[in-house]
Image (tube, rainbow, N blue to C red):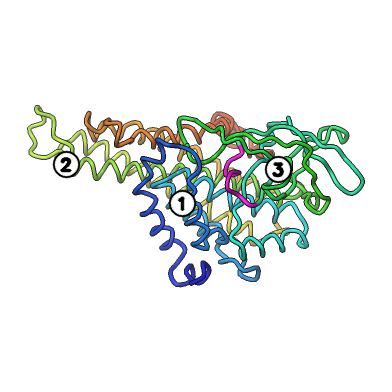
Amino acid sequence: MSSQAQASVISPLQLARKLAADFAETAAERDKRGGTPKAERDALRRSGLLSLSIPTQFGGLGASWSETLSVVREFAKVDSSIAHVFGFQHLMLATVRLFSRPEQWQPWFEQTARKNWFWGNALNPLDTRTVVKTFDGWREFSGKKSFCSGASDSEMLIASAVDESAGGKLLIAAIPSGRTGITLHGDWDNMGQRQTDSGSATFERVRVEESELLLDPGPLSTPFACLRPLIAQLHFTHIFLGIAEGAFEEARQYTLKESRPWFTSKVRHVSEDPYVLRHYGEFWAGLEAVRALVERAAAQLDEAWRKEHGLGSEERAQLALSIASAKVAATRTGLDLCTRLFEVTGARATHAALRFDRYWRNLRTQSLHDPLDYKIHELGDWALNGTRPTPTFYS
């Protein structure tokens, strides 16, 4: 059965849950090992979910952003590294859709769906070490890039370079990952998100054709094009919520099956302990609030995406505020839950083999992608002064 046929038999979310159950069996061990989750990436290729957000007329599954990000969240419950690179797959596809012409993005969509291409990231607009040289009919990228999530074991890359001759303008291109001159270093060894392959890349006189440059309409050029950073922010928010939900469920199972009541509690089972119940009540209330904010923001993104070039700047600003609110809540609630889960599981839950600390490590690592304080500042400026967020690659 083809991957597209398999995906059509059951819903994408059902398929994601089936894959997630398989990923969960090795998630703790792979977290310890780090490196590229090759078997899991190949399972995603076979599943057909790499084309989840591609419209059906180009061979994809035609999912909305709400549906696509729900799959990201499902993966994040058991393996947030897989969730990260899977979400970035669809963020990279959104990048070519929003920044390039139909005669560019349509063939890329068709080939991605037909060949099960994985897309990796080498954009990182804050890393300006890669520069452009201009030749007759083509460009040349040379330099280094950091935080290249999902670049390893990918077929295509979204890469950027600075054009110093044009006043430091950022040029973005879609190029094959195996092109001559591209070296992916495999040097990602952080405390969390250990299988995202978010290490560095080197570009040594990499030829980039004019047809591979995303120039029209280009980055952040219209309210519709400015959806790209909002998709990225909501992608991270779904990861944070998924991590917190996964941590909650793992803690719950451990509490019910393994934890013991404290000897002065005078209860027969830990599930009757009033302090344990208080913690779980607070966890649940926090998760419910984040779910409501996340699902509202995803529905608003779907509506904005459908409007395409009819999207106005005010509508885009309101979406940015909704996503920022959801991200703040997801970050704070998630970090709190992933820290306090040990208060309801007990000392034996710190055994290294369980690796319950990976939930906190993964969320803490990913949440530093851009400072939460500046997200809160934007919300405060809106709440007090009515100032709309300024579109950037991070807001």
| Front residue of 182 and 77 | 182
Q: Secondary structure at mark 2?
A: helix
Indicate whether residue 150 is drawn in magenta.
Answer: yes
Q: Residues at badges 2 and 3 in contact (C-beta under 8 Å)?
A: no
**Element under disc 1:** helix
Task: Pinpoint residue 122: horizontal percent, then vertical percent.
Answer: 66, 41
Whether residue 109 appears in magenta in the rendering, the answer is no
Dominant secondary structure, magenta: loop
**Along the polypeptide, which appears first: circle 1 or circle 3?**
1
- Mark 2 = which residue? 271
Q: Nearer the viewer, residue 50 or 14?
A: 50
Q: Residue at image x 68%, y 46%?
A: 158
Q: Secondary structure at mark 3?
A: strand
Considering only order in the chain, which callout, 1 or 2, is on the residue closer to the N terminus? 1
In the rendered view, tell whether residue 9 sits above or below residue 47.
Answer: below
Determine whether 390 is above or below 110 in the image: above
Instruction: Answer yes or no: is residue 374 visible.
Output: yes
Query: How far apart are the two marked residues, 2 and 1, measured between alpha carbons?
Result: 36 Å
Magenta residues (range): 148-155
The residue that appears at 73% across and 31% down in the rendered structure is 128
Query: Which numbered disc, 2 or 3, marks the residue closer to the eye?
Result: 3
Disc 3 designates what residue? 159
Q: Which residue is mark 1?
A: 40
